[in-house]
């Protein structure tokens, strides 16, 4: 292939690549600036593990609709952390299934009144599957523990006379063939030894399934017109000329 053609393919590749990026949108790390405000939600959250047999009581009773403490007993759980080692309960240490986190955040008045502002909820890491509600309204779902994810909640917090928002995050730490590391659930059917429906997580290698909100949860703002992503394309300057070559050698 001639040089001209390969240059052409590279240009086309770059074009397609930047189009794909433009469609997908970036997720710049939130940093405070004159046009962006940041509110860290680290600290103690309300927490409850769904200990029901099928682990689905939280969804059946819609725990996200009211403050979590109204659904039953809650613990204070530090975020970020793994929930496993916080208490002395073996049942929580080895828990597999849905756990529920909740916290209320006070919203600065301009966040709820200034419609030129985007308010974004960002969860930096939740192992492994997460469902998120704000004031009982489903805003985002995410699979995979190691990467951050976000939800634009501007419309929600700017739609009424709100001063706080209640963030509920249900997290499922079940390892599946699609998680990192992969794992499977093994049901123990021998009812003389195990209670009905008893299961364990099988990884068949040395791994402890630490789970929970493993990184900070933040609220941040941007103007409605904002930088979404930055792409830096570097190049090698080949013809540096005799003089600079000599300089580079010195
Ligand atoms: C949630 O946990 C239960 C119990 O381990 C499991 O059966 C189910 O597949 C999990 N769901 C997701 C979405 O991870």
Image (tube, helix red, strand yellow):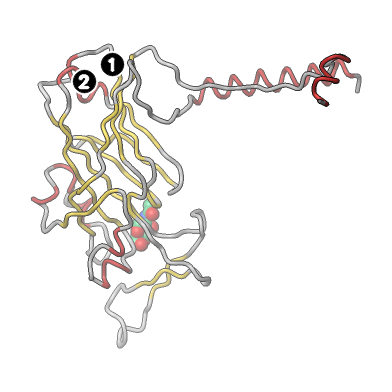
Residue at x 38% of width, y 61% of height: 210
Quarter of the N terminus within the rendering: top right
Query: In the drawing, does residue 158 fall left or right of residue 148?
Result: left
Q: Nearer the viewer, residue 151 or 197?
A: 151
Mark 2 CB near ligand 1 (8 Å cut): no
Identify residue for label 1.
117
In the rendered image, the vertical position of residue 43 relative to residue 150, given as above or below:
below
In the rendered image, the vertical position of residue 39 relative to residue 190, given as above or below:
above
> For residue 19, what is the image quadrant?
top right
Quarter of the C terminus within the rendering: top right
Q: Secondary structure at mark 1?
A: strand
> For residue 140, what is the image quadrant?
top left
Q: Secondary structure at mark 2?
A: helix
Identify residue for label 2.
111
> For residue 185, what is the image quadrant?
bottom left
Whether residues under marks 1 and 2 lie with C-beta atoms below 8 angstroms apart, the answer is yes
Percent of width and height locating residue 233: 65, 22
Query: In the drawing, does residue 180 fall left or right of residue 59?
Result: right
Percent of width and height locating residue 231: 57, 22
Residue at x 34% of width, y 35% of height: 122
Which quarter holds ligand 1? bottom left
**Disc 2: CA contacts within 10 A as few (<14), some (14-19) or many (>=20):** many
In the rendered image, the vertical position of residue 173 relative to residue 234, given as above or below:
below
Residue at x 25% of width, y 39% of height: 41
Residue at x 30% of width, y 32% of height: 121
Q: Nearer the viewer, residue 188 or 144?
A: 144
């Amino acid at each position: 292939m001639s040089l001209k053609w390969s240059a052409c393919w590279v240009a086309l590749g770059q074009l397609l690549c930047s189009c794909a990026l433009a469609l997908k949108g970036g997720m710049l790390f939130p940093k405070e600036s004159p046009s962006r405000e940041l509110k860290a939600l680290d600290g103690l959250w309300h927490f409850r593990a769904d200990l029901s047999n099928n682990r689905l009581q939280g969804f059946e009773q819609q725990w996200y609709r009211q403050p979590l403490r109204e659904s039953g007993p809650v613990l204070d759980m530090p975020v970020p952390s793994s929930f496993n080692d916080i208490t002395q309960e073996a049942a929580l240490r080895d828990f597999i299934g849905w756990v529920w986190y909740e916290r209320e955040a006070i919203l600065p008045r301009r966040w709820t009144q200034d419609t030129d502002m985007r308010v974004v909820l960002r969860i930096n890491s939740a192992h492994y599957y997460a469902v998120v509600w704000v004031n009982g309204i489903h805003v985002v779902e995410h699979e995979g523990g190691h990467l951050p994810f976000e939800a634009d909640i501007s419309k929600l917090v700017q739609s009424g006379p709100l001063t706080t928002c209640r963030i509920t995050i249900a997290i499922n730490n079940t390892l599946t063939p699609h998680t990192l590391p992969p794992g499977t659930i093994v049901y123990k059917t021998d009812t003389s030894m195990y209670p009905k429906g008893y299961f364990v997580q099988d990884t068949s290698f040395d791994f402890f399934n630490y789970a929970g909100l493993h990184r900070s949860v933040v609220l941040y703002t941007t103007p409605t017109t904002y930088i979404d992503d930055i792409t830096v394309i570097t190049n090698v300057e080949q013809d540096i000329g005799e003089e600079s070559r000599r300089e580079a050698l010195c």
